[in-house]
Image (cartoon, coloured by chain):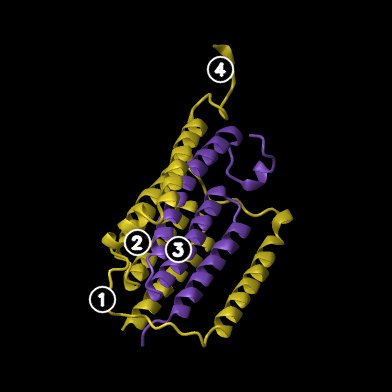
Chain colours: A purple, B yellow
Amino acid sequence: MEPQLSWYLALSAVLFTIGVTGVIIKRNIISMFMCIELMLNAVNLTFVAFASFFQDVTGQLFVFIVMTVAAAEAAVGLGIIIAMFRNRESLDVDDASILKL
Amino acid sequence: MLALLFILFGALAIGCALAMVAQRNPLYSAISLIGVFISLACLYVMLAAPFIAAVQVIVYAGAIMVLVVFVIMLLNVEQEERRRTRLRFLVPTAVVLAAILIAEVAFILVSVQEFRVSPSGAVSDIGLTHSIGPALFTRYLLPFEITSILLLMAIVGAITLARRGGLLGTRSTDSQK
């Protein structure tokens, strides 16, 4: 039996939901960051599944662009995390409830 | 056979994702996340996207996660402290929201079940480099260029943020000069 398109979409939805749950319940900013990466990957799985089942290369191109955005996000986000740790000596998001560093 | 592989890698991805959320130590979370990335790369190979699978392993599991693990070790993050009572309602809220999200997706998947797409397992060059490249540089040139500008902005932003005595660093060093 071949895997259907809906199987991939269901797996992607489950992964995305786990990522959302992690962003809500985690308090460490690095863990939240990794949950966001998980959500991006769930969306990527949807893109690749549609691209494969509809025989269209567009989905894979957008996966490529999403990966670039994730890399840029990693660079800037980790820079912000380091700046925040340097100023507050803490990675807890509750300690960073005001925008001013 | 393909269904068995799908179940294997899908279960691996979900298990690693659950372990990532359940883990209190960020370093173990990062290792679990690498497991998710590797299983997703295997699924991409099954979906006839070898280029994306390779980029997934190289860029995600290689570059991005190395950066994350580097920051975790640089900051010497200990175990997450115990939750304060103020935030105790967050876990039930998260579970309820997750249940709603899953229910919505399940409803949509069930209601569109009759729409069937047959995977054409025939030979196709979708997903190979020589079909991605021309599309990327002709039809989707504008998103490609925008992405390059985004990367440039990310470089400038990361350097500005990380510079000591810079925009967000200690200003006293600047004023003393």
* Left-right relation of B133 to A79: left
**Residue named by callout 2:** B52
Could you tell me which quadrant the C terminus of chain B lies in? top right
Where residue A98 appears, as percent x and y from the top left, is 69, 40
Q: Residues within 10 Å of mark 1 (few under 14, many from 20)?
A: few
Q: Earlier in the sequence, mark 2 or mark 4?
A: 2
The answer to whether marks 1 and 3 sit on the same chain is no
Q: Earlier in the sequence, mark 2 or mark 1?
A: 2
Measured in 3D between alpha carbons, the distance from the residue under mark 3 to the one under mark 2, in whole angstroms, is: 10 Å
Residue at label 4?
B174
Q: In the image, is A60 to the left or to the right of A26?
A: left
Chain at numbered mark 2? B
Q: Is residue B162 left or right of residue B3?
A: right
User: In this picture, is B8 found above or below A17?
Assistant: below
Q: Give the mark count.
A: 4
Q: The numbered mark 1 sits on a residue in which chain?
A: B
